Amino acid sequence: MLQFDILVIGGGPGGYSLAVHAAKSGFKVALFEKEQIGGTCLNVGCIPTKYLVDKALAIEKVRGLSAKEIFRDAGTFSFQKIQKGKGEVTGKLVNGVRFLLKKNGVKVINGAAELKANRVVHCNGQEYRGNYVVIATGSVPAPVKIPGYEYCLDSTGVLNLQRLPKSLVIMGGGVIGLELACAFAVYGTEITVVEMLPELLPQEQREAVQIAVREMERLGIHLRTGAKMLRVEKNASGLRAVYEVNGQENSTGCQYVLAAAGRKPNLTGIDCDQLGLAMNGPFISVDQRQRTNLDGVYAIGDVAGGWQLAHAAYAEANAALADLMGKDDPPPGERPVPVCTYTIPCFASVGLTAQAAQAKGFEPLLGSFSYEANGMALAEGASGTVFAVMDKQSKRTLGMTVVGENAPEMIAFAAAAVEEGTTLEQWEQRIVAHPSLCEMVREAALDAFGMSVHKG
């Protein structure tokens, strides 16, 4: 049996970052990954999706400039070249992570790991024992129990298409579904999104969601909310998605159906009952420092629930490593987590919406600032709106939402303000570079109190 200080099961963002950090801190670390280093994020999730969205954004910008006759025409594009470029980018990132693991002395074992009692892991016929074990097995697409589900593609299948589909029905109006809907709509695919909930992104600022919906409809996306998918039928001409809206059966013919109705924790190799591992519904139960009920065993990332985001997994990895090192760092659950949806335009938020703030007993004031009044946005041909939720009594920043180009970059500035509870007085004194899109974050906060200089 081979002995290590830390055994990490899963090489996604949480797993590989913890492994590298632990190795840099002097621990002997082994990392198990049965598929690709980088997990869903680098290989079939965050990065490849954003590559497709980025190229779609470029195409949209060129089309807008052509409409203004700044460019002679919108030009043509190669979907196959886009797919090739996507593969090159993901490959470069995966190789980069592999290099970091090797450079820092992490033992990488390619194979399906099976966790046993007393922090023992079986893999490829060999046994490994760790002083600590970190479960970072991530999540997988959640199947939908409807007739014809076997005809559907998951997000991995859609990302690997080499020919641009003529039409695509997307089952699920969450982050994955909407991001791919926007990219493929710009490329020319006829898109229909079928979402069971009565509205999209129900946890987000309503005014911002309305802007995003309007823009998606402008791209030609057919949004069917309050719609329950009944079945997928196969016929001579392709597929037909059948769904119910307001008690009435509707259907849409298409070339492909994408099942993007959510994900579930990946517990392959983790026999929770046999191990006595406590669960929180489908997720592994953890405390604020990512500790499970098993001595020396931690769980991070999607498998532990919470925010199913790569940057949340990074933070949870740091929390788990700090705890096993005996540090008393603040747990990640005490800090605001920015959430980004890479639609067209991008949608990003952090902290509380006005509705959530009111439910928590605050007296929220909602400020806003349009891209149309910002010099950099006008120069770049960008559009959108920034929203700020401020507390009337303390005048502190409670939440921010940005819907528009570069929203994921701007939300970092906003997240710091929410975490620090930046006050109206501090916003008034803060100096922000001009011209920049981040000026709008400050202007939106000031607008909540009627103090924005540049809002008409």
Image (tube, rainbow, N blue to C red):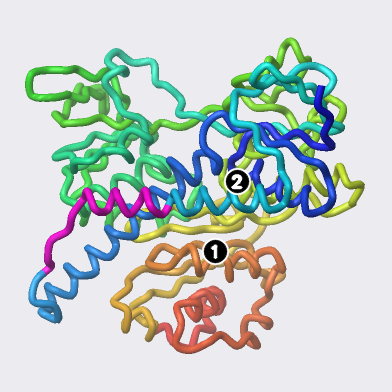
Distance from the alpha carbon under mark 2 to that under mark 1: 26 Å
Determine whether 5 is above or below 363 in the image.
above
**Is 393 a magenta residue?**
no
Q: Which residues are magenta?
A: 74-89
* Secondary structure under the numbered disc 2 in the rendered image: helix
Residue 421, image x and y in percent? 70, 68
Q: Residue at x 16, y 38 (%)?
A: 167
**Left or right relative to 358: residue 151:** left
In the rendered image, the quadrant that contains the C terminus is bottom left
**Is 88 a magenta residue?**
yes
Q: Give the residue pinned by disc 1.
A: 400
Judged by depth in the image, the label closer to the viewer, 2 or 1, is 2
Quadrant of the rendered image containing residue 233: top left
**Left or right relative to 297: residue 388:** left
Residue 54, image x and y in percent? 34, 60
Residue 368, image x and y in percent? 46, 71
Q: Which mark is residue 218?
A: none
Looking at the picture, tell me which residue is in the foreground, 242 or 210: 242
Q: Residue at x 43, y 75 (%)?
A: 369
